[in-house]
């Protein structure tokens, strides 16, 4: 592969991906909205661009073979704030990618596209959309967009529904954890698999308590290694009792399943209607 | 019901709904983007408002019990043109409706949310999203939005996936036709059913050749009367041979399944990649 | 058929069945726990017997070809009160029936075996058990019992999950109503179908708003005639607004879905945990 | 349509189809293995040909638009006898049809392709193959053949799984009857539907007790009229008691489900292992 | 956890659980119907109580956080003998638990709740109930009871459908074996998982030939270690030929699938109708 | 086991099986159409026989306990060439086996029975038949034949849908590879499992990228060891770009999904209608 584009290169997950991605291509073009992402790796260049602006994004994708699209606001915000980067941004990537002859887009989707399913309902990659936030709604939008570009235009995409890629310091993370090495394996397989069509796969490590099912995406060959169970004793010892009427504790989306729409993810949780989920 | 709001009141379908809706409420507030919708029916008032502008929409919904949301650009257009009325417009209706204490929204969704399924695949209301156009993508977006507002906030909605509500002058319409009386019955039932949660139902008449399945929405009590088969002899006599490699003839979405994305529906069809649908 | 046994002959539904059943057999043996069921029809005899007492039930079934088992306490009660007639009574009928060489049992099961499913979830005859009361739990028990006697001993049974067989004076009944003529047709078909194995079928009329699916039981040939929609205008005009957080209004079981376990059906409804249904 | 070919024109069902088919085309070419099929209808010609001989079949299909393929031995026989007409014959029709540019084949498949399913298992058009005889096995073979010619070569086909098209004089026929008018409607719709891809549909009338499900083939617009229930009283009055251990009475295939493989359908039934069906 | 109750503490499986359970709580209250269960472990107390007697059971559950309910007659017996301990006993545990504020019940269900499914039908946790004995019927009853207490009252439960927890000395056990260490892991996970709602999971080791599917219960994090395949060579060498008409060899329930109802498990097997299972 | 018959003993896979099979029986009778298969193993005898000739096959199966049926033309050929060995040959094996009292047949089926499914559609053992060639059609035929002999006559069979058992030198093989040791394990388990009824299982190694699902056949205990991922780096480095409009690259069947029907597998690929697969 000659040219690979990584969006959201300044973000937490993007930062972890930059170096491994340079190994998969001649040139990695990293992009984000910040001025500078620090020291570049061999084979990497950086271009500042606003996802929400087609005229900034289109040039970045010129001549690219694939795009790893991790750029977005990664927290719950009012719809108006997410509209540009998370909705229009996805459209810009796909449309500019199509025009530039990009073969495939690997997208950081999220469990929050299906976050209102109950955690005791084991869900596969074909679970119906049940977003828990506007953040999750943008993931639903992008998955449907990707489906259409494949059906209509033959542009491939892999949608990685990442559960949680952070420290394991709560009981939910015992099931939802995606380690950084497993994230890198997942993105690598999404790139090196010869054909993927339109695919969805959960981004989760080999946790004993992983609550989702990747069986139908097995052709991608993702075989995670890490297991959050090594943290179980410590985490469970400190766990608070569960409130089984709290969607934030009962649903796949975790705290996002409880948070009021459009508020910053963890700031406040005075949900009025949370008992209405069915 | 005291106050009912109808958006898209100047549109073709909206025009047919105005009179019957006045029978279901004390006041029907019709709204659209035009200056004037002609003579009003008893109990009807008209307010001009742009769906894409929250400050215009919110006042219209004040004090409403339900909204019948038919307002949108009803043709395929570039994403940028649809973004305001068809995407942001839906958000505005739901968010303003929620803040105004609206109980339920009845939405004109469309077969184009699932238009890339093959017509020989009989689809139910749980068929996965496969939009055929940006127009259809906006329907997907709104269905997911409606799901979230029900799950998180208890705001009910019924999504009417209308197949085609127009003259029966082609073979596709023998299956897809929704007559005006059946449209009115469908909207009436979506309003008078005591509770609906989040529901999807196809808008199609009692056609012999109807290609979709409403079984799982039977609690809504929609029982269409008209049957496009009365036009079959005439239509079939004039039908051109089918090209089985043309998605426009093989898919539920009809011509939209073939049209290039973002172009006006029927203007041009120089699709490059149409054979890629799976 | 020579001898047919009807249990619960003094009950409301049993009373309606007595005369039509005499037309299907040489001798109808009606039984119940009361002393007397009034004037007998031609071909009918009456025997008093307590379902909970095997030594009273076994003699009644001697020489019978089939049993129509409608006997039970037909209201929610504490488990201890239902144990005899509704649980042990079913066992007695099946075990005595087996020993007596009975070919088939037609059983009055109930929607309350699956009453905690949401009404907006259209359910088929293979919906998983979700009883809403001890009354419903006894129906689940009897269905499983019937399954076992078929699997192990070849004793056939048809389980009629009756929705509601009473006046249509509330919105739930617009969907759930089973008219008496349709009840009679249903029982007749359950008897005259040559082989039934172990079958479940919903007992509901041809209501526009019927919320359940008998498709998989179509071989029984039940085609209901009556339609509660004739009462719709009147009932809807008087309907109270729905509380979408109330399981009694949102679930198939209706008020039983809300009532506290073990209390008489409609007496009190101070449910503490009703929001926990999923 | 200019030229339509009907195979099996001398058979019972073929005879009923000849006249109606002449109304759908300029020329109906009827073919069978006999010398003569009697007086021809206007627009009909007859050609004697052996299905098992490609050199006899290929010329018949030259220039045809569609083929209605009803030719076969229509009884259970040893495999060796069926091999030519029922297996090789189907191949010859499809291969010759493909080479001749035929657009579509309408095939008389049979319930015997799925005859070992239990009658109390309501089956749809996607039921897995469970043939009950070599006769049924040939139907499975031809369905798979038709699937392949569509997938690989774009040759359309409709496979009519006829249940039983004969007098209603037994209890099975109350469910399985296909009247001649409904047969004609079924074949007509299989021909006049603009595109069909690869489709399967059951051939059964609008019987109360019809044990199969055509829901997923609804786009074909087949709406049968006749109902075997008019014969129910008489048939049931004379019915023998059912032996629930007899696959011939419990399975969709009826007597064929019991008959020893390779024997003439109803001649003998000394099955050794019939209890092994699962 | 302060107080944990173990019923059936004198039984074979209960005996294995006593010590490990003391590690999970401050106080383990073991209970059974015998006078004495031998030397107690640190943190354990013993109370004699009859499951069938609410007035004996209710005091034992006072103040408990969870209950591990393994008490029951663990063999097939006539219904009348099982009624008290296996049916009423379950009710007493759930009702007393609810009144005492117990958060969760971990229940020893059994493969015999679904024992009449064919072993060549791989079954998941959502397999429909097909009990093979009255023993299995009590498991079905208790699962439905647990479902209702969760739906109506928010009382959580995990139902462990144990396949066989004994020596591996027959071919069935190569698939069905649950080792003691894996049993302990299973019970531990059922206790330490923060929320479980109503859950079902099969109790089986990591056998090559395990015939059931726990995929949908993966959130419980049960990962068995032992594998009966180590016994395969020896067991297979001594195996008798299979009789494929014997439900005891073909069904998940093993010998219970063949045994006459109500008889002691392995004593006699003169089944009359066993070929009728479907 | 006394006598085991292996057909296709001179073929590539047959050759690998001969020695391991001698360990499972007193006498292995190897058969093929060639005069000589070289040095025999201890316990092995060789008989030349033509699968297409019943009078040659029947004597070979006399007294056999099981048959491992790997004999067939193993390439795509015109139907007429495959008819004898691949179709009639299967019939001869089953019919002769039945008459000889054979208990079980282990059959080399193939992914080509379902080869037209898209590779991005993960398929289970219950995937519907979609043959990609006449070669694959013969596999479909034999699976249906095996189903019937089990349903009607109690003759067991295991159908091994082998993906590809050859060198890993292309990207498809990274998912489809079946190593020889895993092949031997698979055949061994198909033989030593006490009862199998009618079973289908995919023959594929423990490849990261295996695109099929054996979950429902887990009772057979097949646990492959080898993993084609060890060849991934080398293979992927040399891979050509994928043409996503080429069924040969997008479908499970690989090149066979593209090849013209009836032509030798890899010789020519001038497919006209390959884009028509749905």
Image (cartoon, coloured by chain):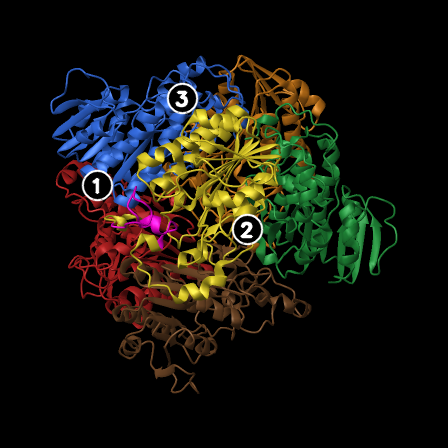
Chain colours: A blue, B yellow, C green, D brown, E orange, F red
Tags 1 and 3 touching, CB below 8 Å: no
Which residue corresponds to mark 3? Answer: A78
Please say if C112 is above or below A244. below
Residue F138, given in percent of the width and then of the height, sits at 31, 62
Membership of C221 in magenta stretch: no
Secondary structure mostly taken by the magenta-highlighted segment of the chain: loop
Residue B18 can be seen in this image: yes
Residue B202, given in percent of the width and then of the height, sits at 48, 46
Mark found first going from the N terminus, 1 or 3: 3
Q: Quadrant of residue C260?
A: top right
Q: Given the image, what chain letter belongs to the residue carrying mark 3?
A: A
Label 1 in the same subunit as label 3: yes
Q: CA distance from mark 2 to mark 1?
A: 52 Å
Which residue corresponds to mark 2? Answer: B181
The crowding category of the residue bearing disc 2, from other C-alpha atoms within 10 Å (few below 14, some 14 to 19, many at least 20), is some
Residue C207, given in percent of the width and then of the height, sits at 63, 49
Left or right: where E133 falls relative to F224:
right
Please say if A62 is above or below A231. below
Membership of B265 in magenta stretch: yes
Image: magenta residue range:
B250-270
Residue E218 can be seen in this image: no
The residue sitting at 35% across, 36% down in the picture is B82
Q: Nearer the viewer, residue E216 or D227?
A: D227
Q: Which is closer to the viewer, label 1 or label 3?
A: 3
The residue sitting at 56% across, 48% down in the picture is E258
Q: Given the image, what chain letter belongs to the residue carrying mark 2?
A: B
- Label 3: which secondary element: loop
Which residue corresponds to mark 1? Answer: A194
């Amino acid at each position: 592969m000659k040219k690979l584009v990584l969006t959201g290169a300044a973000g937490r997950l993007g930062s972890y991906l930059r170096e491994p991605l340079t190994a998969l291509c001649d040139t990695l073009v990293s992009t984000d909205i910040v001025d500078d992402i620090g020291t570049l790796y061999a084979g990497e260049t950086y271009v500042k661009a606003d996802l929400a602006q087609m005229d900034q994004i289109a040039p970045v994708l010129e001549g690219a073979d694939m795009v790893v699209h991790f750029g977005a606001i990664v927290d719950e915000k009012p719809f108006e704030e997410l509209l540009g980067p998370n909705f229009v941004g996805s459209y810009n990537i796909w449309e500019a990618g199509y025009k530039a002859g990009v073969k495939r887009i690997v997208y950081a989707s999220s469990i929050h596209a299906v976050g209102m399913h109950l955690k005791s309902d084991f869900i596969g990659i074909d679970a119906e959309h049940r977003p828990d936030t506007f953040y999750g709604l943008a993931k639903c939008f992008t998955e449907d967009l990707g489906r259409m570009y494949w059906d209509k235009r033959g542009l491939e995409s892999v949608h990685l529904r990442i559960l949680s890629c952070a420290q394991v310091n709560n009981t939910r993370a015992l099931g939802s954890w995606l380690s950084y090495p497993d994230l890198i394996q997942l993105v690598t397989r999404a790139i090196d698999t010869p054909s993927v069509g339109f695919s969805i796969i959960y981004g989760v490590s080999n946790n004993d308590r992983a609550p989702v099912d990747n069986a139908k995406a097995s052709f991608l060959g993702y075989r995670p290694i890490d297991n959050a169970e090594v943290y179980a004793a410590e985490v469970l010892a400190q766990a608070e009792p569960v409130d089984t009427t709290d969607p934030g504790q009962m649903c796949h989306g975790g705290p996002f399943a409880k948070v009021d729409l459009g508020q910053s993810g963890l700031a406040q949780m005075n949900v009025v209607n949370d008992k209405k989920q069915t």
